[in-house]
Image: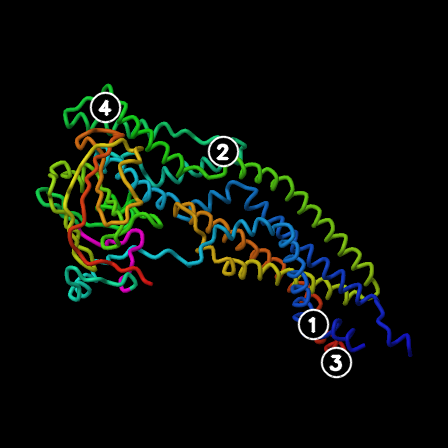
Amino acid sequence: MKKQGKFHFGNTQWALLLGWITSLLLVVLAVGLVLFSTLGTGSYMESAVRKSNFGQTACGVMEQDFISFGAGAGFSAETMTAALSPEQVEQDMVDSIHRIYEGNLAAHEQNAIAETTYAAMEQEAAAKGVTLEGGTKDAVEIVAEAVRQEYVNYTTLPLRVQLGTLIKKVQKLVWILAAGCALLAAASVLVLLRVTRRDPRMACRSLVFALAGAALVCLVIGLAVNPMMDLQRLSLEPASLKNLVVCYVEGIFGRFTVFAAIYFAVSVVLGLLLRPRKHKKESAEY
Amino acid sequence: MKRKYFLRSSPLAYLAVPLVFAVLSLGVLALMVKTIAGPYLGLASWFMSNSAVSTQPQDLMAQASELMEHVKDGDSIPLSSITYPSEGDRYGHITISGTTVDAPVYYGDNSTILNQGVGTYKDSYGVGIPGEGKTILLAGHNNTFFNDLQSIKEGAVVTIETYYGVYTYTVKLSGVYDYRDTTSYDFTRTDENLIMYTCYPFDALGFTPERYFVYASYTSGPVLEQDQ
């Protein structure tokens, strides 16, 4: 009687424990794969640039600044914004991102924008009957250089060196993390199957519990973390960069819902396979 | 036995057990995140503002008529009774006698503002808006809104119509300074005074390191009283 009253850590408890460990490892595996497919790849950031309407927003702010430069330097808005296009801004940002992923952390000099702007200013000056030479040429070149510098700032990610180092680390470590988790999860499943070898039903149910548990955690991360962080409160300037960061981070968490769907689908399939087949038995009796 | 039956056969177990697993896993993850990313999360919170989304600039001059009906010259208005402008808000209109300067006045002096009119330099203590009893520093582009600042004469009257009252200032002095010359303004003054500046020379092409400053003293307009 005394023995019955004591807690006995039997096969069912082991199955549950291993099921939870498998579930946790599946979540960590999802974290690793999400990080690898987002922070680890340039194409994800490229898609965030396009989704966040980066080109249009950055172009809008730069237009205002360039027009302001012109209003101080004696040139029209048309001249100052001659070299700007949202498509080009977006493309230059995408190129800058790919350079970081290729390990080139130096900012692109964007000399073409200075040359185009200078040519437009020279043309307007000529239309006013002024030839750019001497001190005037130098003064106009300063304006063209200011335009170039601002363009570089808007089409380059800040903290490039730190970001480049982080990306390299993530690309290396995440593979180890994902592979390690996959191996451990497989080992955990094998042990679970070994422990429950006399009870296949419990083994399968434990696997369903593990997958459904992992799906639930992924769903919570995918749907609840974003609203909790409230990224719109992010005080980041310019607006184009803020939109990019918000879109980028939201996308990362959004990817967990994909893993939630995968885990959930697999658990449903396993659950369906486990259904007791009453009809067959009944029909056999008849 | 009941517990074993529940785990092996009850359909409810498909909901209850994964829920327990999820809660446990979230707890472990939260602990891991707190341990590993704690310092970074603290840093991230530094980038978060308390207000949700920055508000759009307002046209405060739309409130002008109803407010100004009750304000007479020489009156005092409690500062708390007016909406203090935020960056980008249009809060006034400037005209200068003897010139063609006639432009809207905005709070702040970023590029967007200077493309739309005259901007007001803002900081936390040294400068202010008309009526505050501080230095008011207005900036405008030499090729647009402040182009005719070049015609200004000593004694000219600067009128700034705001949404809470009309202010006039008398031009006393003008001068040309380098853009890095900090002696061209004094933000420690405790009397109301107006400074307007623009790039110089007015007709120059390209970057100009010189600025044209106009200094004017307060003549009339309601005083904005600081709250006790």
Question: Which residue has dot 2 on it?
Answer: A99
Amino acid type of the residue tagged 2 in the rendering: Arg
Q: Pick the quarter of the image with the N terminus of chain B.
A: bottom right
User: In the image, which is nearer the foreground, mark 2 or mark 4?
Assistant: 4
On screen, residue A63 above or below A249: above
- Side of A168 relative to A130 (left or right): right
Query: In the rendered structure, the residue with mark 1 lies on which chain?
Result: B
Q: Pick the quarter of the image with the C terminus of chain B.
A: bottom left
The residue at 28%/61% (across/down) is: B79
Q: What residue range appears in magenta? A: B81-93
Which numbered tag is attached to residue B13? 1
Viewer-closest of B203 and A3: B203
Residue A4 visible in the picture: yes
Amino acid type of the residue tagged 3 in the rendering: Tyr
User: In the image, which is nearer the foreground, mark 3 or mark 1?
Assistant: 1
- Side of A73 relative to A109 (left or right): left
Query: In the rendered structure, the residue with mark 3 lies on which chain?
Result: A
Viewer-closest of A116 and A68: A68
For marks 3 and 1, give the CA distance.
32 Å
User: In the image, which is nearer the foreground, mark 3 or mark 2?
Assistant: 2
Do the residues under discs 4 and 1 have CB atoms within 8 angstroms? no
Amino acid type of the residue tagged 4 in the rendering: Thr
Question: Which residue has dot 3 on it?
Answer: A286
User: In the image, which is nearer the foreground, mark 4 or mark 1?
Assistant: 4
Query: In the rendered structure, the residue with mark 4 lies on which chain?
Result: A
For marks 3 and 2, give the CA distance.
73 Å
The residue at 24%/53% (across/down) is: B90
Question: Which residue has dot 4 on it?
Answer: A136
Count of marks overlaid on the render: 4
For marks 4 and 3, give the CA distance.
104 Å
- Name of the residue lying farthest toward the front: B190
Viewer-closest of B163 and A85: B163
